[in-house]
Amino acid sequence: MESGDGRGAEVNWAAIRQDFPALATLARGKPLAYLDNAATSQKPAAVIERMRRYWVEENANVHRGVHYRSQLATAAYEGTRVKVQRFLNANSVNEIVFTKGCTEAINLVAHGLAAKGIIRSGSSVLVSTLEHHSNIVPWQLVAERVGAHVLPIPVSDAGELDLDAYRAMFQSAEVAVVAVGHVSNALGTINPVKEIARVAQEQGALVVVDGAQAGPHIAIDVQDLGADFYTLSCHKMYAPTGVGVLYGKLALLNSLPPYQGGGDMIRTVSFDGSTFADSPARFEAGTPNIAGVVGLGETIDYLTCLAGGPVDSRESLVEAMAAVAKREDELYNRTRAEIADIPGINVYGDVPHKASVLSFTTDWAHPHDIGTVLDSHGVAVRTGHHCCQPLMTRYAIAATVRASLSFYNDEADISAFGKAMHVAREMFK
Amino acid sequence: MNPELRDLYQDVILSHSKRPHNFGKLEDATQTSHGYNPLCGDNIRVFVKRVGDRLESVTFEGTGCAISTASASIMTDMMRGLTVAEAETLVEEFKSLVTAGTVADSFEDSDASALAGVHEYPVRIKCATLAWNAIAAAIHGKNETTTE
């Protein structure tokens, strides 16, 4: 994580909370305490308003009209690509591909690497036991097609990847790709992706980092990490649903075959055969989610300016994300403390270096019952396997309760959570 | 505690979930079925000993939330001694109970009526019906059932 200069202390978080109109609503007649941010985040008013303005003032198709509105829409759409380049510190704007989500981005890479023969019969894709199903199943699908293997990097009891075991896997397998999450959605643990990438590349393997859960918490620098591919789930980082990002090193992207065929991705089309545009157009067949991408651009501006720095500045973004990390660490510790006096609570992934995700089971109630009690108090958490069944199997549990915090959560949210947890304990003990 | 929550987690439900009846494997079962709810990870197995047309004994084992465990416990109590046709009717009546809150005569004064509150919680209906779907599957000789 990149460090800031302590500017986080100056941020008025109570005022920032006011930027999110959803947080002022009720849930089951109670003030909403939204602690399901790892599933999706609420949206700033500025983003909602920017999308409304797009629909009213700019809506037209992109990349093809000579008319006024099409130029406005194209400028807004392509303007976001530049913002994402800065957000990820990518080398070129052409390394940024918009997808409909993080899942599609991973599928695109898996498909492309198999079609190009990088993932081939007898080769292996290493994923980790911590992975979300969306960073397991796409690899299984292509592996099955070409006769490759998908092997899990083991995870410790504490929720950290076993790097010794990881290094050893290169001795016994022909590793084509290593695909790991930056931040675990189920536990919040932050994986040492820079070291993972270094080892993989030494061994000639490509590295795909699933950044779905990192985007809202960490200033990401794809060049520093050394990732060959990096993916974002934008709705988890305060942008609209239906937008994902695939970053890839430019030469690699341009070496992959298209994922889908259609409009916007071609150079020439004839019945003798078609030729394809370079990245990013090559991977953006059809009319994209223009409004969503425009909303993403506004979200990146919002995050960049969160700690008071100027817009369009990487330094400002890095400072803002450092302030976010500091704030979320405090909220996590406060939430953890709120249930510390309740007996029989087992926290998973309770390591120092983690994002603000509190994942736990209890000895006295099933996570779903706790989820229902919390819900009746207006507290939104996720209960279940979090699309991480291999991880649940690893810990021999069916499900956890997951409270995932954002910088916009406050003392009242955490108190509501604590109070509802004590009610649940009284009910089920 | 708010009344809706109290309605869902009545004492009779909590009591069944903490100390389920007929819990354990039935060694001389003639039929068995596995019920799995992928959403929650509720995972139970229902055992039936059928003699002629009657369900002589019904037990279950497994893990799940309070609603699925209580519902399984109540189901095993109610099914014992019924004919296959009666059991099938009861399963359908139970589904109406938890999806629409309709209390059939069979459930008057029974612990099952305490599960009527589930119909206010659509995401929990599958928890309540799991064991009932499992016994229906067992009766029909299917050994797997899921909520999906």
Image: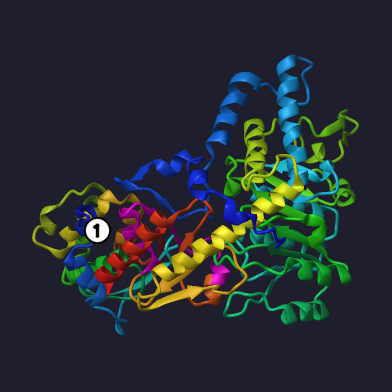
Residue sticking out furthest to the front: A10
Does A327 sit above or below residue A173?
above
Residue sticking out furthest to the bottom: B27
Residue sticking out furthest to the left: B109
Q: Amino acid at mark 1?
A: Val
Q: Residue at x 65, y 51 (%)?
A: A320
Q: Residue at x 47, y 53 (%)?
A: A409
Chain under disc 1: B
| A98 to the left or right of A46 | right
Which quadrant of the view contains residue A198? bottom right
Does A401 sit above or below residue A8?
below
Residue B105 spot, x, y in % from top left: 10, 54
Q: Nearer the viewer, residue B38 or A378?
A: A378
Q: Which residue is mark 1?
A: B91
Residue B134 spot, x, y in % from top left: 34, 65
| A212 to the left or right of A193 | left
Q: Which range of residues does the magenta coloring cover?
A: A366-391
Q: Residue at x 50, y 44 (%)?
A: A15
Q: Which element type, helix, strand or loop, lies under badge 1? A: helix
Residue A201 spot, x, y in % from top left: 86, 67
Residue A252 spot, x, y in % from top left: 87, 52
